[in-house]
Amino acid sequence: MEVLHWTCNDVAAWIESVGFPHYKACFTDNMITGRKLIYVNCTYLPRLGVTNFKDMQVISACVRELLGIRETSLSRSIADPPRDSMSLFLEEKSRTGEQVDSLTFQAFMKMK
């Protein structure tokens, strides 16, 4: 997945391309790379400096679309939320190291 190899500048260019150029510094100052995008959601965005709720919703939706992640159902139990396989895979890929770099989605699914 190409996005996992994005630099901070690539992420900044992407956030600008989806209509939020005023948040470029929030992403670059916090060194958000493609590997870290998996964690960018409405909970995490205020820590980056994105506090407008509507912007947070749109950016979170854009991140999910970019990464191919399904939105979790609102009827889920918050004690044990179900996770889709792609989200779990991308969380694993957000780490660094030789083993993680070589991990494919197919191999991840076999391990699961």
Image (cartoon, rainbow, N blue to C red):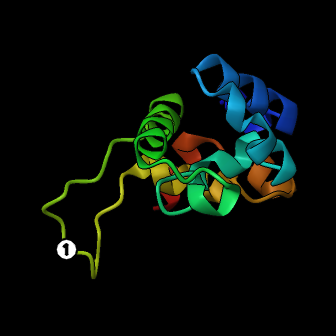
Q: Secondary structure at mark 1?
A: loop
Where is 55 relative to 47, above or below? Answer: above
Quarter placement of the N terminus? top right
* Residue 43 horizontal/vertical position (percent): 49, 63
Can the viewer see residue 102? no
- Residue at image point 72% right, 47% down: 35
Where is 65 relative to 49, above or below? Answer: above
Q: 78 and 21: which one is in front?
A: 21
Question: Disc 1 designates what residue?
Answer: 77
Where is 78 relative to 76, above or below? Answer: below
Where is 57 relative to 46, above or below? Answer: above
Q: 50 and 81: which one is in front?
A: 50
* Residue 8 horizontal/vertical position (percent): 84, 38
100 relative position to 54: left or right:
right
* Residue 30 horizontal/vertical position (percent): 81, 54
Can the viewer see residue 105? yes
50 relative position to 86: left or right:
right
7 relative position to 87: left or right:
right
Quarter location, residue 17? top right
